[in-house]
Image: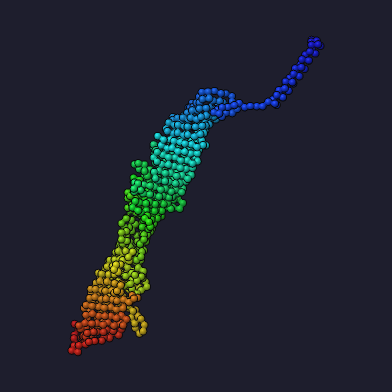
Amino acid sequence: MASPRTIRLLKAFLLGLVVLTLLVVGALYTIGKKAQFTPPTRSPDAVDTDPGTQQQGSGFDHTVSRDGEPLFRMRGGRDRRDQDGNLFVEDVLVTVFRPNGERLEVVADQARYNLERESAELQGNVTIAGDDGLALTTEKLLLQQGGRILESTGDVEFRYGQNGAITGMAGKLRADLEREVFIFQSGVTMSGSQDYQLKANRVLIERGERLIRATGEVRVRWQDSVLNADQVAATLASHQDRLRFLRAHWNVSVRLHTGLADQARVTRLRGSRLGILFDGPEGEVSRIEIEDEVRGRARIESASAMGTSVLWKTRFFKGDFVRGNLNSVLAEGRAELTEYLTADPSFLIRRICSARSNARFGPNGEMQQINALREVDIQNRQVQMLADSTRVTPESLEVEGMPVLVVGGLGKIEAPKVNYSESNGLVHATGGVEVELPPDLSNPLAAGPLSGGQEPVRVTSDEGFIRPSTSSFMFQGNVRAWSGPRLLRSHTLRGDAEPQRLTAGGGVENVWSVVRTSTNRDERSQVRVRADGLIYEPEASLATYRGSVEVVDGPRTLTCSELAVRLDEQGEVQSLDCEGSVELNAPEEGRRVRADRAEYDVGEGEVVFRGNPAKLFEQSGASLQGATVVYSVQGGTVQIRGRDPNATAEQNP
């Protein structure tokens, strides 16, 4: 057992140790309060690291693998590692191994790599180069998912394809290397080695499918042609050096320039959906399809080197090109085609509306043929035609219908078939023609043999030739023209503009409506005239009948070789003058009169026969003769003037 003295010494030692410990702790506390912290210094080109650096080294080389397959390999100069598992590397070279066996080489000034997330952030002069010509340049690039996803939020310059077939710039990039999908955003511009350019807000490229999808104010230019749309999808040719197919959606407008420089042709297109196929020998346009899904008013406007333009509007178009020039167009849906002269001042050549139509064009863009079917409506500067179908060439329009209706300055024409000549504006109607002419005194029919009425003049015939611009015409074959009670029949009927004249031939029959005064009131009666031919001259207000003329006025018949009918200012019959073998036959009155000529005053109701001599034959067998025989139509009385006192009664011949 320890002595008391030993115990006292041990207690004193322990007490002194406690006091010393307290003094040391207090001193350390006082020093800590008065001390200042100074972070470690870094060189200007050092990698951006966290302060908690745990390891430093040089000559970094690291490969990331999955399922035994390498994803990417990162090499570099100096490196650091922090406590969060981030590795900072300078002078970086990254090799990305793609599933198809190709490699991407990425070079950057520095990188931050996270081992757990298998992601790397590269900064400073980042450049990517691929085996197939892929190249990207940016200031900051993020490698994610083991190098399969590339993302940049800064400006990017890119190039890919053989010999740098496509180059461009963008504000952002996201790329899925495994799917070979590249998404460029913010002010994207692209150009191809075949002289095409693309601008858009966002562009997606599927390299494996050679597909480009662009959205947001898209503008595509190739050579001198331009396409604008909200969305565009483009397929590239196998070598990715030229366009193969374009499809555009919403607010689509295109300006196509085709042909040689000295004979350039412009075709404009507009709609909500468009497809263009570049399948020509030199990659030129070979087919277009354009549609307007909303309004049904897609447009094609094509200008030719001949100074004409064709504007087409319908729901859907398909156009084929030969050597870059528009060769044919098929329109489906209610279509409106307008052809006009582009010279200053421009004017309408024709407008054709139909349910379905197609057209063929020549090498210089000139229209060669247009075919329109169902509910056809044709208009030009002279006429309007409604029909079932039409075939249009630069020389003529061949129109068919049940029937065709032609409306022009001359009136209305109906016929199963109509041919319209572009050179002289002549309408040729066949298969049974029906014409309706307005009661206009400028029309020789309305002002002549069928004058005096307020009703339209109607004509039927087997065939008709009409020139509406000059109101000239010719009808032939079973011609029948009438207006109210007035009638004209003949084999041919012709109206000329210069000089203005109406002629009829081949057995003419004309029914006049004449006004006679009887007991202080006007009465209208009919006079029928038959002859071999008729000539009417509007300026002289004179209708002349020739060849076997026969005038039937009630129970009386007047025959002669030539008959002249004079009209007053209102177109009413004023007088009839007969010449050559004149004979009046009035069987109800038992009289006949023969003379060299006869003058019939319609207003007075008297016929004055003149001859050398004029002879009157009574039913009784007696005859009288004189220089003049005056016959009253109303009273049936006869007066002999200049009678030969030596004349004796004769038997009627």
Q: Residue at x 45, y 50 (%)?
A: 293
Frontmost residue, 622 versus 87:
87
Please identify the quarter of the rendering in which residue 517 is found. Answer: bottom left
Q: Which residue is drawn at 42% across and 44% down?
A: 221
Would residue 64 be seen by someone viewing this image from the given angle?
no
Quadrant (top left/top right/bottom left/bottom right) for the N terminus: top right
Residue 304 is situated, as x and y percent measured from the top left of the image, at 35, 51
- In the displayed structure, 100 sits above or below 458; it is above
Please identify the quarter of the rendering in which residue 516 is found. Answer: bottom left
Image position of 309 (left or right of 508): right
Q: Which residue lies furthest to the bottom in this view?
A: 645
Image position of 557 (left or right of 127): left
Residue 387 is situated, as x and y percent measured from the top left of the image, at 36, 59
- In the displayed structure, 184 sits above or below 443; it is above
Q: Which residue is drawn at 36% across and 57% down?
A: 349
Quadrant (top left/top right/bottom left/bottom right) for the C terminus: bottom left
